[in-house]
Image (spheres, rainbow, N blue to C red):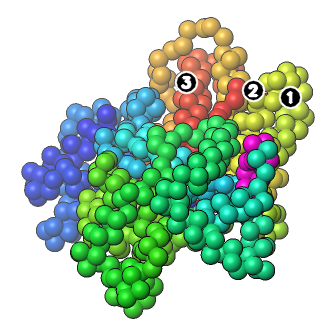
Amino acid sequence: MIEKKLRQEIAKIAKKNWQVELSDVVLVSPKELWQGDLTTNVGMKVAARWGVPASQAADIVIGELVQSKFIKKNFTKVTMAGPGFVNFFMSPQALYETVQGGLKNTASPDWRGQKVIVEYSSPNIAKPMHVGHLRSTIIGQALVNLYAALGAKVVAINYLGDWGTQFGKLLVAYDQWGSKVALKHNPIDEMLRVYVKFHEQVKKNPELEKQAQAAFYQLEKGNAKYVRQWKLFRQYSLVEFKGLYKRLRVNFNHWEGESMYQRLLKIIIKDLVTKNVATVNEDKSIVVLFNDNKTPAMLIQKSDGASLYATRDLAALKARVKKYQPRLMLYVVANQQALYFEQLFTIANKAGLAPKTNLRHIKFGLVLGAGKKKMATREGEVIKLEELLNQAADLAWRIIEKKNPQLKSNAKTKVAEAVGVGAVKYNDLSQNRLTDIVFDWKKMLSLDGNSGPYLQYTYVRMKSILRKMGKCQMLKFGVASLSDEDMELLRKLAQFKNALERAAQDNGPHLVATYLYELADTVNSYYHESPVLKAPEPARSNRLKLVKQAAETLKQGLGILGIQVVERM
Ligand code: ARG
């Protein structure tokens, strides 16, 4: 509220003097606390427009602002910084109000009511999900939560890889070597087994390749037997995926699959050809050429009429834009597909498929095992995500067992799950998504580094203080003057919403994680310096209130990252 009002006050002055509009006024939290609680670039905006020195404009803004009752009431200092920034230092009361308000409502004017599509996870059926899909799932869900917290209307989409020539291979392989019983009991393993066998056998018997092509052709034509078998493969895969999603607390609004866009392929191809974006070759294959001398051509139809990954993506893109008219559509997919998405978006722009949608490829790096070696993903040798999460929970269990042996056994198991899975998620989300991440269990599970368990433990400590607080009457916040430490914590808390906005600007959940880590550090040194329960009133009330807000902020922030808090550990 205070922030909104301040922005209006600044805009009023800017409009009166220089005809600068409200929409041009940016007000954010500065990076460092010494720079104040809020900062605006209005001086620069005026300078850019009128050619006056920014500092002169900033001076005028400050001169007029400090007369206002609103400023006198809510701010202790308004200063100029750098080449024309204006920095605002809020009063404790105003900060506290901001913190309380920010926790109740994290919506931001930039995102409230805006439609955002996040496509993520998108594993391929009939295969185990690999660590790359794990990253997409974790990052994607964090972005969904982040935009939702900012007030956007988010559509979370899982786009399954359930179509393509590989299903021709699988159908042929299963026909020859598959076992119904094994498929029922261990579907993914069985599908993987026959698929791997296909690749071994095709070396000796190239005929198989032709059979597979024919089978996919039949599948695309709707051959009843193949469709039935394919449906079964899909269904079995979904059961497995859903178990993992439940464990990861991942929720989609919409399940799509490449297969769904089958009937739209002809239309999109025709559209692209008519618009001269695509060219038909002599052999009837259809291709998009890019005239920049560097981007390789993209095939959208094979000479036998079979469709491709790209064709289905273009059809999906068009259909989604038509259905949702999003402002932003994110594709959370590994780095390896960077060129592919560049091609896809260029085609979409050329053909005018999404004129009002910002299309973004949210890329991310690899997952490396200990020793920074690439985690094995060769066929038949994949790391099972299920096992990975089990391992995380087991290791967490041992830590909890040591730390808090009195905890009941089933509570221990629950906490271990939250801590183990949280550690895996935090390890991913706390790093810039473009970098490769390393599975270093010791670091991931450490209770005093930049780790998920450290943040969860910080929360547990705060909750334990709050539990001990007893029933006595709490005083109103800020009756007595606050210490430097109180102020530092309060001001850090007031930056929460801004951290969320920054994270959305970058599509970088690590900015939320960084903020939470800094907050945890601030809190931990806070009660090292300042007694809370033993402090005399009114300091005690102030501190308890600050601890309560800090715990709540940590919980909400971790919630955005998809990490559960626990009450004891
Ligand atoms: N299923 C694909 C894979 O596992 C990822 C799909 C990414 N999304 C998309 N719209 N192409 O590689």
- Tag 1 and tag 2, C-beta contact below 8 Å: yes
Which structural element holds mark 3?
helix
Q: Quadrant of ligand 1?
A: bottom right
Dominant SS of magenta comes to helix
Tell me if residue 475 comes above or below residue 310 in the rendering. Answer: above
Measure how far apart labels 3 and 1 are at the Cα level.
Answer: 27 Å
- Tag 2 and tag 3, C-beta contact below 8 Å: no
Is 191 positioned to the left or the right of 9 in the image? right
What residue did someone put label 1 on? 404
Q: Is residue 192 magenta?
A: yes
The quarter of the picture where residue 373 lies is: bottom right
Q: Is residue 60 magenta?
A: no
> In the rendering, which numbered label is found on residue 568?
2
Give the image location of residue 329, x and y in percent: 39, 56
Tell me if residue 479 comes above or below residue 334 in the rendering. Answer: above
User: Of 159 and 166, which appears nearest the observer?
Assistant: 166
Give the image location of residue 287, x and y in percent: 39, 80
Is 193 positioned to the left or the right of 355 in the image? right
Give, as a single range, the part of the protein colored magenta: 182-194
> In the rendering, which numbered label is found on residue 545?
3
